[in-house]
Image (tube, rainbow, N blue to C red):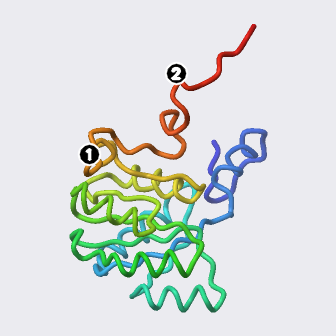
């Protein structure tokens, strides 16, 4: 039996598992008004196969100071009990100060506010009604340079009948009709 948390048996499959659950940890900064939510996320993420090293930081200005003093993070997670608790000015100043991708999670699914958060500099928005599994996927997507927005929010882009195109979606590239035909 393979136990990649304690004393693994040496085998080919162990090498594959070690690559997945290895000692390399992603470094996450959480800025959230709720101490309980931060503690729960910290515990849950530390128990995942791809473990996260989590820093619980009280304010955005404190986070900016830590980054300016050399602390490096793979992703920043801003959390709030409601969308109105997510300060757009904080996101803008954070995005202007650091090169680290920002994911916002809040207890709301207001598409207009989500789009405002994304325009301010966040790379993703996740309503807190989604599961931990979805949060981990969103963190990974944002960490690797992608953008994460739920389908509901993506479909309801304010001021437009068309859904918001993700940078990596085929529709964000040129439509089929505009592409030159390939000759055989």
Q: Residue at x 34, y 57 (%)?
A: 126
Q: Residue at x 47, y 45 (%)?
A: 166
Residue farthest top in this picture:
184
For marks 2 and 1, the one nearer the N-term is 1
- Looking at the picture, how far across and down is residue 8, in whole percent? 70, 52
Q: Residue at x 28, y 65 (%)?
A: 106
Dot 2 corresponds to which residue? 177
- Looking at the picture, how far across and down is residue 36, in whole percent? 29, 77
Question: Mark 1 falls on what kind of element?
Answer: loop
Which of the image's four quarters has the N terminus?
top right
Q: Is residue 128 left or right of residue 15?
A: left
Marks 2 and 1: which is nearer the front? 2
Which of the image's four quarters has the C terminus?
top right
Establish if 183 lies above or below 102. above
Establish if 17 lies above or below 43. above
Q: Which of 12 and 73 is in front in this view?
A: 73
- Looking at the picture, how far across and down is residue 21, in whole percent? 63, 54
Dot 1 corresponds to which residue? 156
Question: Mark 2 falls on what kind of element?
Answer: helix
């Amino acid at each position: 039996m393979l136990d990649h948390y304690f004393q693994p048996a040496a085998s080919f499959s162990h090498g594959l598992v070690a690559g997945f659950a290895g000692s390399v940890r992603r470094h996450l900064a959480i800025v959230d008004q709720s101490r309980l939510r931060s503690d729960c996320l910290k515990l849950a993420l530390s128990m995942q196969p791809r473990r996260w090293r989590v820093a619980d930081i009280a304010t955005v200005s404190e986070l900016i100071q830590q980054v300016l003093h050399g602390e490096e993070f793979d992703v920043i997670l801003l959390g709030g009990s409601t969308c109105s608790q997510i300060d757009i000015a904080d996101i803008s100043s954070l995005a202007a100060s650091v090169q680290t991708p920002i994911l916002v999670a809040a207890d709301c699914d207001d598409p207009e506010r989500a789009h405002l958060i994304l325009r301010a500099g966040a790379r993703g928005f996740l309503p807190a009604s989604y599961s931990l599994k979805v949060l981990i996927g969103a963190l990974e997507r944002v960490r690797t340079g992608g953008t994460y927005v739920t389908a509901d929010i993506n479909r309801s882009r304010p001021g437009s009948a068309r859904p918001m195109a993700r940078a990596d979606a085929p529709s964000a590239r040129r439509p089929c009709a505009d592409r030159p035909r390939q000759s055989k």
